[in-house]
Image (cartoon, rainbow, N blue to C red):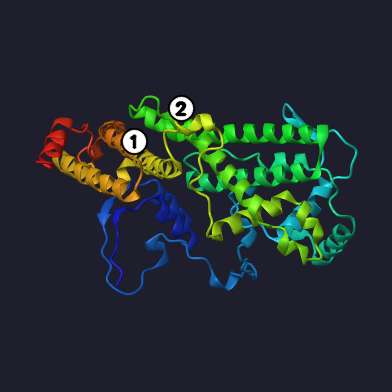
Amino acid sequence: MFIGKIGVHSYLNTVIRNHAGADRNTAFTNRNRLSVRQDCFTSGSAQSEWESGIYRPDGRNMRPIGSFEYTQVLPDERLKAELLPPSERASYTEKDALLNQYLKQYRIEGRIELSSSAQNSTEIVRVILPDQVCEDELESFRQKLNEEGLGTEIDWRGVDADFVQMRTGFFNVERLEMKADYLASRYAVLKDRIQNQYTGDQQLLEMEKLEQIYAETKEELADSYAGSIGDFYESLGQTGVSEDMKTSVLAMVDKKAAAYEEYLAQTDIYAETDVSSDQWLKQDDAYMAARLRESFAVSAGEKEELEPANPELAGRVPYDTKDILFAGTYAKSLSEQLKRPEMIWNTREKDSALGTFLAARESSAQKEIEEADVSGRLAEMLHHVWKPFMEKFMDALDGSLDENRALAEKKPWISGLIRTSHIDRRQVYASYQNSFR
């Protein structure tokens, strides 16, 4: 049933009547009349076109635009893959080593000048993704390596390239130990190769290169951790923690390197490769370092408790490996809460309830620290960060409330629907203290 409209008969009705064949003189007369306000009520299943004022095209003149075909495109799995640096990859297989050596053929020397890049050499450049190398071409290259080997020179350029992304922070703190193991195992394998392959001045020269790369990479790893995790704890009032953490990361890497060196001196990790036709793998230090890590991890004689290689660090290393790893993940958890406080606490709740909530979170955090079995020094430091963290957490909540206030000033009608007043910290701390009584 159609129910008519409330409105004004205007010039539109006149035009519709005119198109419907109404008398031109009548249309002219009606057009100059004053509009009359009137309410119309029509009961029935139909309404004339001129009364509704709705344009109704002639269906006989309508034509389809055309046919469309849709093709579903499945997502490319390669685009989903996380692009990890060598130091964060869980495995490094024979095929990975072969592909890496294959792609090295197309390395170029280049530099970046302002917004452009320049090539230093005249070699042919081939831009290719690993997935684009066909199996036949790869197999042909493998046969070539079996015949010619990799040569006696150490690929220092390749070593440098593998160490370009050794920084760690909140974005990858879970992989800190993986990075430390990667660096330490590469160092141990290269040192073993230099000592067995070279003599005299050449050996000294190669060892100097290795020590320089190792020291610079280790420093980068430690500085990045101290600059993110350490500085975060410093911002919570723990003065000196950043430098202590840097010292501890340096000692952790040295400790792992010493463990790998000792294990390598007692274990022949090349034995498996001896029975393979791919003897060039023995010259691939990245591949042999991966085998060293695997063998070391499953060995019953794992030497995790070795003292740091530098005796001077032995008596003054603030935190051990377990401490450093836990401190990193704990800092990341607190940092994420400060970035998105509204995901943790609803400001529409009473402020006294926030105090009770924070007390419960502190008790839970202390239990987590105890179960982690970290050193007393770290446990004490983490205990002292909680109250400064509470202040920063409430600062972050106030920041979101400031945004609410700004929104309410632009849209006054919304002021009664959102909170704009800051957290009452007296209520928070009162209920916080009562929770421990």
Please state if 345 lies on the left or on the right of 335 as rendered: left
Name the foreground residue: 93 vs 214.
214
Please state if 56 lies on the left or on the right of 434 as rendered: right
Name the foreground residue: 323 vs 114.
323
Residue at screen point 49% across, 43% down: 171
| Separation (CA) of disc 1 from disc 2 | 15 Å
Residue 112 pos. (x, y %): 75, 30
Q: Name the residue type under label 2.
A: Glu
Q: Quadrant of the C terminus?
A: top left
Q: Name the residue type under label 1.
A: Arg
- Report if residue 345 is visible in the image: no
Residue 302 pos. (x, y %): 53, 54
Please state if 242 lies on the left or on the right of 134 as rendered: left
Count of numbered circles in the view: 2
Q: Quadrant of the N terminus?
A: bottom left
Residue at screen point 88% across, 59% down: 144
Name the foreground residue: 396 vs 300.
300
Residue 148 pos. (x, y %): 89, 55
- Which residue is most to the front? 266
Contact flag, marks 1 and 2 (Cβ < 8 Å):
no
Can you tell which of label 1 and label 2 is closer to the viewer?
1
- Report if residue 14 is visible in the image: yes
Q: Which mark is residue 243?
A: 2
Disc with the residue nearer the chain's start (1 vs 2): 2
Identify the element where label 2 is drawn. helix
Residue at screen point 35% across, 28% down: 238
Residue 103 pos. (x, y %): 79, 51
| Residue placed under numbered mark 1 in the picture | 377
Identify the element where label 1 is drawn. helix
Which quarter of the picture shows residue 108? top right
- Badge 1 local density, few (<14 within 10 Å), some, or many (20+)? few
Residue at screen point 40% across, 32% down: 232
